[in-house]
Amino acid sequence: MDQVFLNGRILASGEAWISPLDRGFLFADAVYEVIPVYHSKLFLWNEHYLRLERSLQAIRLTNPYRATDWREYLEQLVEANGGGELSVYLEISRGAEETRDHHIPQGIAPTVFAMTLPPLAPDPVLEHSGVRVVMLEDIRWHRCDIKSTALIANVLLREVAREKGAAEALLIRDGFVSEGTSSNVITLKGSTLKTHPDGPEILPGVTRDLLLRLGADLGYTIRRERIRPDELLGAEEAWLTSSRRILAPITRVDDRPIGTGRPGPGYERLRQAWQRHLDAFEA
Ligand SMILES: Cc1ncc(COP(=O)(O)O)c(C=O)c1O
């Protein structure tokens, strides 16, 4: 992560400065996206861009650039960092103003920042054994569909999971499994894939939606319905999905196994379908 993008310019990260009066810093008055890059190309750009526009609209922040300009800037950033396989993190905050007033100020320039992140190292443990998760009460706000940088609740929940030796926390809201702290959840039972319906309780994951489309092509029935914890525990398989980890089999919840307690055949099928999709994208 050498070169970063700040307000229309690409420059060395050490030379990029943002005001301490920026509302992104003072209020987490900002939204973000993380877009995977394969073969130097932005993966699922349209889907990520649509979600970015929805987040901006939800926090009443005008999109500072047109879609074509966004794409051009981010492609320049990818190239400046050597391209290949990485992720782009972008953030738009409302910008800096003197008064630290809760009222949304008018007429100030937003701050636009982007950087690249290295890909996550392949995790052989994940492939062979899956991950253990814990269930925790969802303490987040009521607009989890906005990709807001106000992530302290997610950070604290993930830390509790780590203290319990788990890779992720499955969050329980109103008695149902909403999602993970940085991932969505899909369960498999029979030939049905189930996931929480879109709404304010979850971030609608771009990876999840692609995997569900691929799952439908494989003949699975897709149900967007709330999942009870006991239903998750009784599933044959369950997975976490996210742009950075793609698909991770959940093999234990607290101390109880899911299915056989090993990554199952459904995981293999979907993982292979995803790989075929990626190969076609890269070709
Ligand atoms: C809370 C939350 N849910 C779900 C996801 C998965 O979204 P995506 O597949 O678009 O990366 C993320 C990703 O960061 C997240 O933070």
Image (cartoon, rainbow, N blue to C red):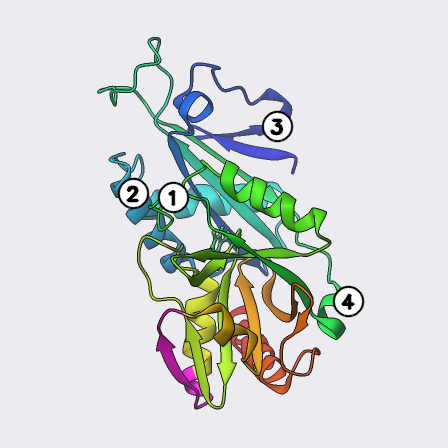
Q: Is residue 156 magenta?
A: no
On screen, residue 127 versus residue 196, left or right, reads: right
Residue type indicated by callout 3: Ala
Residues under numbered marks 2 and 3 in contact, where contact means CB atoms less than 8 Å apart: no
Point out the frontmost of discs 4 and 3.
Answer: 4
Give amino acid for label 2: Arg
* Residue 12 image label: 3
Residue under label 1: 70
* Residue marked by disc 4: 125
Residue occupying image coordinates x 25% and y 19%: 105
Does the residue at mark 1 contact the one at mark 4 (Cβ under 8 Å)? Answer: no
Distance from label 2 to label 3 (Cα)? 24 Å
> Magenta stretch: residue 219 in it?
yes
Q: Secondary structure at mark 3?
A: strand
Q: Amino acid at mark 1?
A: Trp
Question: Which element is circle 2 on?
Answer: loop
User: Are the residues tagged 1 and 2 within 8 Å (C-beta)?
Assistant: yes
Q: In 3D space, how far apart are the residues under numbered discs 1 and 3 (Cα atoms)?
A: 19 Å
Q: Is mark 1 within 8 Å of ligand 1?
A: no
Q: Which residue is mark 2?
A: 66
Query: Which stretch did the figure color magenta?
Result: 216-226
Q: Eyeballing the image, is 81 above or below 183?
A: above
Q: Amino acid at mark 4?
A: Val
Mark positioned earlier in the residue sequence (2 or 3): 3
Query: Going 46% across and 81% down the picture, which residue do you hit?
Result: 215
